Amino acid sequence: MADEEVVVLGFWPSTYGTRATIALDEKGVKYEYREEDLSNKSSLLLQMNPVLIHNGKPVCESLIIVQYVDEIWRDKAPLLPSDPYQRARVRFWADFIDKKVFDAGKKLWSTKGEEHEAAKKEFIEILTQLEGEIGDKPYFGGERFGFLDIALITFYSWFYAFETFGNFRLEAECPKLIEWAKRCTHRESVSKSLADPKKVYDFLLGRIAG
């Protein structure tokens, strides 16, 4: 597969584009990353999913891309469990992450007063549920870094912004989750892909001010 063309179109603060690059790096697949210029677009484009182009064919939506990468390059570092029930659980929680985390986090900088306090409580409850799913395991899937870890770890670069706008510390609220996140960042695939948390925060401040 040395002659394959693999291109990822992404946007540096996006939690979604990072999923594609982490999955490819875990598989040892060479790819070209192309940064999209979305600087003059609405902040809603932060939720825009990336595009993977494989031999000229586009694949969209970050979780679908990760599954595609796992199926195409299945000979190395499996990301999804082989057991059908465990795969179903992983997909359930990945869907939970996509439906809950960003929308709840956004309320931390878009609300005030009682609404803001409710948003803070909601956000922490969501992460507490995810922390419960990890339990005492090194990764969501046990000893092996996989699909669900990729789905959530990309939000780690946004945690500083969530904490700052929400006026709380996730290490105090969800210590096992933060321990898991730090463990993930020791992986080269993760550390090279995550955006700098303070740059994400500054980027958000600029969006809010604009």
Image (cartoon, helix red, strand yellow):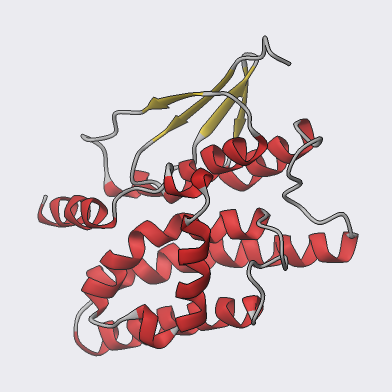
Left or right: 148 with respect to 127?
right
**Which residue corresponds to the image point at 67% horizontal and 54% vertical from the top-left?**
147
- How many numbered discs, if any? 0
- What percent of the width, then of the height, locates residue 162? 30, 69
Q: Quadrant of residue 94?
A: bottom right
Residue at point 41%, 61% (across, down): 156
Give the side of residue 13 with respect to residue 89, left or right.
left
Residue projecting furthest to the left: 209
Question: The N terminus is located in which quarter?
Answer: top right
Q: Is residue 16 left or right of residue 68?
A: left
Position of residue 75 relative to residue 3, above or below, is below
Q: Residue at x 65, y 43 (%)?
A: 66
Q: Is residue 190 left or right of residue 167?
A: right
Asked if one can make out residue 126 in the rendered structure from this viewpoint, the answer is: no
Picture coordinates of residue 194, whole percent (x, y) = 40, 48
- Residue occupying the point 45% across, 73% down: 178
Q: Please determine whether, in this image, residue 124 is positioned above or below residue 28.
A: below
For residue 70, which quarter of the picture?
top right
Q: Position of residue 68 (x, y in %)?
A: 71, 37
- Rendering coords of residue 64 (x, y %): 66, 43
User: Quick one: 88 or 83, which is closer to the camera?
Assistant: 83
Residue 186 visible (yes or no): yes
Name of the residue lying farthest toward the top: 3
Q: Nearer the viewer, residue 171 or 10?
A: 171
